[in-house]
Amino acid sequence: LALFLARASTVLFALQTTASAALMMTTTTTRLAEGQHYNFLSEIDETIQRVLATYDNDTLLSNVPECERQDLVIARALRGRLQDMERKRHCPICWLQNNYCFCADCPPVVPEEEDPTANTLNRLFLVMHHGEIGMGVDTAKLILASHPTKCRLVVAGIGSKYQKSMKELEDTIANSNRNCLVLFPDEASKPFHEIAKEEAAKTQYNEHFDDADDGNNRNNNNGWNIIVIDGTWQQARRIKKRYFGGGEETFPSSSSSLRLPSIRTARLSDKVLRTLEQELVDGEINPGHQLRKHSSTSRKVGTFEAVRLFLGDLVENNKVDNDDTTIPSWIQIEKYQQIANNALQAQNGFPC
């Protein structure tokens, strides 16, 4: 009888917990719908659940296939982080404590479907190192907040077997490689205006000779797929080499299709870089610099600001029909990083 009562109590507690979680999810969904934001952490939570449903909590890594060990390690780490964020009442959008939430001041671009960038940008894949998830100082979350319908959040290290966004990224690269660019300043990277000229020349050549379209030689009529890597510079280089360097992958993974072709890299224009190298702009700290300290000036530029300015390059170098009254998204979100910096400094007790 005692055993029966104990089990009944456990079942009742589980049902209460599930009902409470469902109510919380409904409330959160309603709040996000009203605020026009999208909770990308909910997708990460779904990915975590898929991984953890395969293995018990006490499963030893030595008993896990080598190709899935990293999936499990990252899923367990992220589960703890998301639970910690919920316990400390952190906003799932801006990742700060609710008392310092700045989401109302950084809404999605309006209207996103009418923005001139929409004609040149198909999808923006944010490939993030798992260590950045939930960090208040991370700037890439502003990309997700400002472009919720264009963005896809991909956690590096968890394969497409468990992560839908990784599967979409793999399919996009496989089906339209020519439309994909990795925003990464390596030796082979070019500013967008040079890439646009090359594409125009290829399109003219193909139209002249009526070449067949084999998918990987497709023109960019449907817009560009921009891949952005978020993490420390060392992490970003490893992610770039693993996923987008061509040839075989460096690390084992649960994904079956990570042997992807090499993808062109793009960088910001020299004009933009000269502006970002300035410590002060109009007598104030350069708004493009992140709060993290770096010895190299170029590395002071956060992921968000780099993407924002690159979106400006997309609009500037593509002829689009634009209503003069429509403000481009990269202008709409110009103040977002400074707003986020001020909120984080307030939370940490530093003067804004």
Image (cartoon, helix red, strand yellow):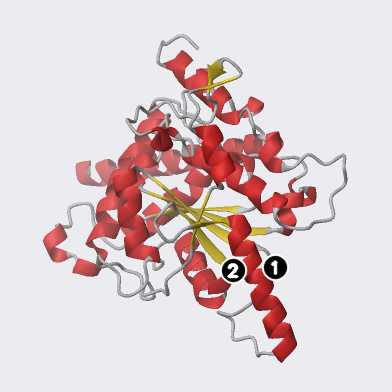
Q: Position of residue 188 (x, y in %)?
A: 43, 61
Q: Nearer the viewer, residue 343 or 236?
A: 236
For mark 2, does the 10 Å Cα neighbourhood hold few (<14), some (14 to 19), or many (20 or more) residues?
many
Say which amino acid is labelled 2: Asn
Location of residue 218 with respect to 40 vertically, above or below: below
For mark 1, does the 10 Å Cα neighbourhood hold few (<14), some (14 to 19), or many (20 or more) residues?
some
Q: Nearer the viewer, residue 116 or 85?
A: 116
Q: Position of residue 310 (x, y in %)?
A: 59, 47
Q: Say if residue 8 shows up in the picture.
A: no
Report the residue at 35% width, 70% height from top: 255
Horizontal side, residue 59 vs residue 296: left or right:
left
CB contact under 8 Å: marks 1 and 2 = yes
Q: What residue is pinned by disc 2?
A: 179
Say which amino acid is labelled 1: Asn
| Total labels drawn | 2
Report the residue at 31% width, 48% height from top: 235
Q: What residue is pinned by disc 1?
A: 222
